[in-house]
Amino acid sequence: MGTARSGIGWLVAQMGSLVVAWFASVYFARALADPQTALGTFYAFETGVAFLILLGNGGLNEAIVKRASEGDEAKEFASAGILLSLSLVVCLSLLVVIASPLIIDFFDFGGLSVIILLLTLFAYQARDTMNALLASDFQVGRTGGVNFLNSVGQVLVQISLVSIGFGAVALMIGYSAGAILAAILAIFLVSKRFIFVRPSKYHFQSLIKFARYSFLNNFVQKFYDNIDIIIITILVGRAATGIYGIGFRFSLPVMVVSSAISRSVMPEISKQDTEGNLERIRVILADSIVLGLFFGLPALAGFAVLARPTIVTFYTAEFASATLVALGAVATRIPEGLRSTASTVLSSMDRPDITFRGGAILMTVNLVLDLLLVPTIGIIGAVAASFIGMSLQLLYLSYHLFDVVEISYSELPSQEVGAEAVASIVMASVVYGAKTTVSDMSYIVLIGLVLLGIISYLLVVFLISGGVRRRVVGVARVLVP
């Protein structure tokens, strides 16, 4: 499977996962007795699991992808990664057991909450480590299939339990069950491609050396992803957390596109870097920027028009206050996608130190602004803090990226990006005009407006930009050899 096709396979699988999760969230918003509080409790559980998984991984995933994809002694690096991963998760599980009284008090589900947490931790550790091994073998698309099974299994169990009267605990059990199914599939896929080879001290040291910065960068990212939930839960309450979580989930498709691009190009850039091919890396960088904004800009423009009717129609008026959160979250994904591209290029070229310093800027700014804005203007303050912090990090990484890759501002694909912006504005105008003629909003009308926006955007952007058209057609040709 080629690098581009593998990345597209991962993207398709992740989009499928988002669709499944989105329909499930709509069902939960209508079926749960107290949806805001129940969802807020579940989002708090997700946040806790995310930080535990980060500690259990220790930055090994990126280190495994980097070292094993370089081609030299891949089996030894893979084996060393598995052993390190197992050691970390065992140690972390002991800490969870020690902290079990605090966990029981917070979730109020007795010892069941500790058992669910431990099962989830082991399952995600196995899934993520196996996914890293697949990605190092240029099998990114297969990791998407693993994640899709995770989402489907999770949602099926959650809906089954909610339908018979369970609340937040049903969402937690389903979360664990999906991870267990995904881990089983990931282990099966890896077992067909890798054999264990006894690693040497060098292989452990090499992974740990790279993982140090990778762990710090991942900590910064997890901190950014979850600090808003933590601050809102503590200062405002779980109901506000539920509203914020629903709003932010509308931005996930844009994030998934950026992640697909980053995951697919990282092994390729790492390979080109070892060969000293800067020209090829510059081409990959330009393509990544154009393709990322090809989805991000129209998503922002379209959602500016359809955010409120979409949330009210699908989630009921009870969640209408999530409108500004959703719009701000989609806007934040624009600099975040560009940041993701810059960070991937720098890490692939063995400069994780730069991405860590940029992450420190993001973490500090986001935390300070959260503490200042959330108590004063509520959950909208968390969105503003995220946007400002992400934009500042992007500026810092871009400054260093141009030096490392030896590229100037004039070499960026500004014409293509400009065409995408113009096409997005035209699309938003068309959709807004059509929306004003509708008196009664419904599911069918919303879907029709979205399709109208997609068609109008593609027609305009392909008409005015040959560069965008060439890149998109190139991706399409990967799918149809």
Image (spheres, grey):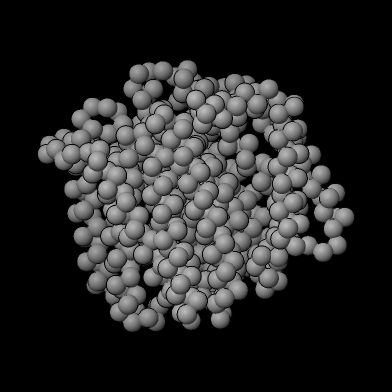
Above or below — where is 358 with respect to 236?
A: above
- Answer left or right for 74 relative to 363: left
Q: In the image shown, does 401 or 222 lie closer to the viewer?
A: 222
Quarter holding the N terminus? Answer: top left
Above or below — where is 106 with respect to 364?
A: below
In the picture as drawn, the residue positioned furthest to the right comes out as 437
Q: In the image shown, does 229 or 480 lie closer to the viewer?
A: 480
Q: In the image shown, does 306 or 195 lie closer to the viewer?
A: 195
- Answer left or right for 156 relative to 415: left
- Answer left or right for 405 relative to 243: left
Please state the horizontal and vertical placement of residue 447, each as a whole percent of the image: 71, 53
* Picture quadrant of residue 141: top left
Q: In the image shown, does 451 or 355 lie closer to the viewer?
A: 451
Please state the horizontal and vertical placement of residue 324, each as a whole percent of the image: 68, 60
- Answer left or right for 32 relative to 166: right
Could one spot residue 301 in this view of the protein? no
Please state the horizontal and vertical placement of residue 114, each as a whole percent of the image: 31, 73
